[in-house]
Amino acid sequence: MTNAFDPDAPAPPGSGLFGLGSPLEKAAVRVLPVPFEATTSYRRGTAGGPLAIEAASHQVDLHDRQTGRPYESGIHLAQVAPEVVAWNEEASALAQRLHAQEDSSAERETMLARVNAIGAELNTFVFDRTRESLNQGQLPVTLGGDHSVPYGAIMACAEEHPGMGLLHFDAHADLRDSYEGFTWSHASVLHNVIGGAADLGQIVQVGVRDLGESEARAIEKSGGAIHTVFDDQWARTRLDGLSLRELVRRSLDRLPPEVYVTFDVDGLDPSLCPQTGTPVPGGLTWHEAMLWLEELTNSGRRIVGLDLCEVSPGPHGDLTGQSWDAAVGARLLYRLIGTALLTRGKGSRESLTGPD
Ligand SMILES: [Mn+2]
């Protein structure tokens, strides 16, 4: 097959995610944009993530030393579904009124029920779309939006791959049993997945540094089913000059052969995601996050699905391609996809050893 595509050429405007314009039927990767952030509790803006990331993706160099040529496999970005936009507008407006606490309790109950119903509809939508990707043998990638968004994707992957594990990057454990009354809250996504999936394997969490007491208890009570590498443990390993790679390997060893990666960008140091919804000091550096992905590949495990959430270009969006958060998000998305393709036997990488 002749391929006229030049990975080094600048991406023309309107050329789609990473300038690839990959048609759906030829793509190994299907990215579902879900600009939804109804239950965002602190700062808004993650609904602008998908379009800002698409704009910023035109600056990403497609040749990747760590993952080779992910672009060759085809990466298709679906259109934003109008119903998702409508759900986000309605549920966000209701959630903001609920935060303002100016309505009667009866009114509040009705509004809360509606927000939760919209969340359930969104879950079904994401589940169905993920199912379609899985049916076609494509890697399902969900692009949030807040971290409530990938619930349906994780459920669909868990159904397709019984016993799959979860690798969860996040500043938060997301184990709350609903948050502010919202059943489908960004702060509850792991709790909901654990409650909803029939056969979910080991969970490994990384970057966690903001934790409620009930969440700490949930981790304890899980008897190891949830293994959390707390950020202070991570930082101590780094500060004491011990091997982070060893810590990563030991942690990954707990995971089963098939792994879903859920990446809340606030797991990274906030200098890499200053506008994210709930930033917390500490977190992984860029290269530390990449170390996890590199070792996941080395371990021979297979990524069966992934999401990237909570990337925010700020409250007003950014379609210029110049948002720093989106620039990081686009590169992270490309690296996550490239890593997943590598684990699925596609692509190759250059030697990662340093200079002799
Ligand atoms: Mn999260």
Image: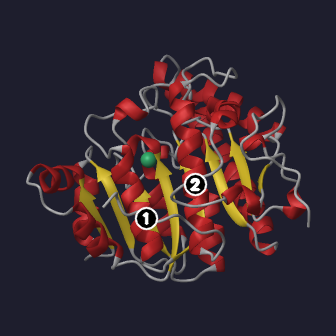
Residue at image point 31% right, 51% down: 207
Residue 138 appears in view: yes
Compared with 29, 79 (above or below) is above
Of 167 and 246, nearer the camera is: 246
Q: Tell me which corner region of the image, top left, top right, bottom left or bottom right, holds residue 326.
A: top right
Viewed as shown, does residue 213 lie left or right of 86? left
What's the mark number on residue 307? Answer: 2
Residue at image point 22% right, 51% down: 213
Compared with 340, 301 (above or below) is below
What's the mark number on residue 203? Answer: none
Question: Which amino acid type is marked by label 2?
Answer: Asp
Residue at image point 71% right, 44% down: 33
Of 176 and 17, nearer the camera is: 17
Percent across and percent down for residue 119 are 63, 47
Residue found farthest to the left: 240
Q: Secondary structure at mark 1?
A: helix
Q: Tell me which corner region of the image, top left, top right, bottom left or bottom right, holds residue 93.
A: top right
Question: Which amino acid type is marked by label 1?
Answer: Glu
Quadrant where the C terminus lies?
Answer: bottom left
* Disc 1 crowd, CA 10 A, few/some/many (<14, 14-19, 20+): many
Percent across and percent down for residue 317 are 63, 22
Compared with 356, 86 (above or below) is above
Viewed as shown, does residue 73 lie left or right of 236? right
> Total of numbered circles in the picture?
2
Residue at image point 61% right, 29% down: 92
Q: Rounded to the nearest whole Å, what is the CA distance between mark 1 and mark 2?
A: 17 Å
Q: Secondary structure at mark 2?
A: strand
Name the residue carrying label 1: 294
Q: Earlier in the sequence, mark 1 or mark 2?
A: 1
Of 171 and 39, nearer the camera is: 171
> Which one is closest to the eye, mark 1 or mark 2?
1
Percent across and percent down for residue 335 are 55, 53
